[in-house]
Image: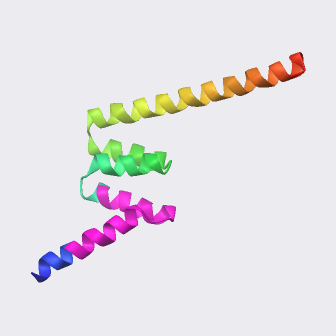
Amino acid sequence: MKAILGRFNAVTSFLQLEKHELLEFRRIAGLIYKKAGRWKQSVALSKKDNLYKDAMETCSQSGDRDLAEELLSFFVEQVYRLIISRKDNFVHMVADKWCGG
């Protein structure tokens, strides 16, 4: 019974780390996932907090081709969104300049 309660407390503490307000505590949660071989959860936390280096290192260490392709797709989507947002901002800036808007 004591072992079960110890595990329960560890899981509760871990979930608190994962949702902690400070970035470094959430990063620790991602590193724990990585050490436990829970690659997808680790990468998901890293992406959520923009810890892209951690996500790439975890992906590399996992050796999981599907996870690597998923991360690459995520990066491509992020770059695409950035280009589109900058293009829209540029178009608005030019329109204001030339059309007196």
Residue 40 in the image: x percent, y percent? 30, 46
Left or right of 98, for residue 6: left
Image point (56%, 29%), residue name: 81
Number of residue marks = 0
Q: Is residue 37 above or below residue 60?
A: below
Q: Residue furthest left?
A: 1
Q: Quadrant of the N terminus?
A: bottom left
The answer to whether residue 63 is visible is yes
Image point (39%, 66%), residue name: 17
Image point (34%, 43%), residue name: 59
The answer to whether residue 53 is visible is no
Residue 35 in the image: x percent, y percent? 28, 58
Find the magenta span and give its range: 8-33
Q: Is residue 62 above or below residue 6?
A: above
User: Secondary structure of the magenta portion, mostly?
Assistant: helix
Image point (17%, 78%), residue name: 5
17 or 34: nearer the viewer: 17
Q: Tell me, yes or no, whether the highlighted magenta stretch contains residue 32.
A: yes
The quarter of the picture where residue 12 lies is bottom left
Q: Is residue 52 above or below residue 100?
A: below
19 or 65: nearer the viewer: 19
13 or 35: nearer the viewer: 13
Residue 20 in the image: x percent, y percent? 45, 65
Q: Tell me, yes or no, whether the highlighted magenta stretch contains residue 53.
A: no
Residue 4 in the image: x percent, y percent? 13, 75
